[in-house]
Image (spheres, helix red, strand yellow):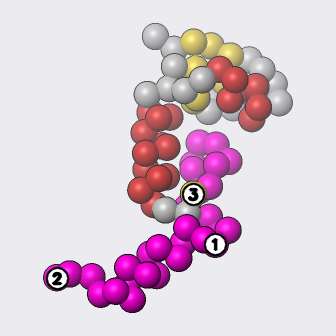
Amino acid sequence: PRESSSDLLKKHEVVHCDVREYGCRQCEKRFKKKGNLKYHEELHDRAKYMCLWCAKRFHQERYIEKTCRKRTITKME
């Protein structure tokens, strides 16, 4: 079934509000849309860097430095 105009409008309204109800399990980033969170978490799954202190995984080394207090970094094979 096709979505009604009011349903589409409700989905679009998310763009204009500051509520970010979908949070990443691996870092502190939050998203307005579930699909954006899913894409973001897939980046963690392909991450090349991991903080040895907290075991969070990151796509780029600079994100570890922004997120983790202790900068114990290893490059994953």
Q: Hey, which residue is sitting farthest right in the picture?
A: 69
Q: Which residue shows up at 57% across the image and 57% down it?
A: 31
Residue 8 location (% of width, % of height): 38, 79
Residue 61 location (% of width, % of height): 65, 20
Name the residue that disc number 2 marks: 1
Callout 1 amino acid? Cys
Residue nearest the observer in this picture, 34 or 55: 34
Q: Which residue shows up at 60% across the image and 23% down it?
A: 60
Q: Which mark is residue 31?
A: 3
Mark 3 or mark 1, earlier in chain: 1
Say whether residue 27 is visible: yes
Crowding at dot 3, Cα within 10 Å, few <14 / some 14-19 / many 20+, comes out as: some
Range drawn in magenta: 1-30
Residue 12 among magenta residues: yes
Calculate the distance from the C-alpha at mark 3 to the C-alpha at mark 1.
Answer: 11 Å
Q: Please, what secondary structure does the residue beneath circle 1 have?
A: loop
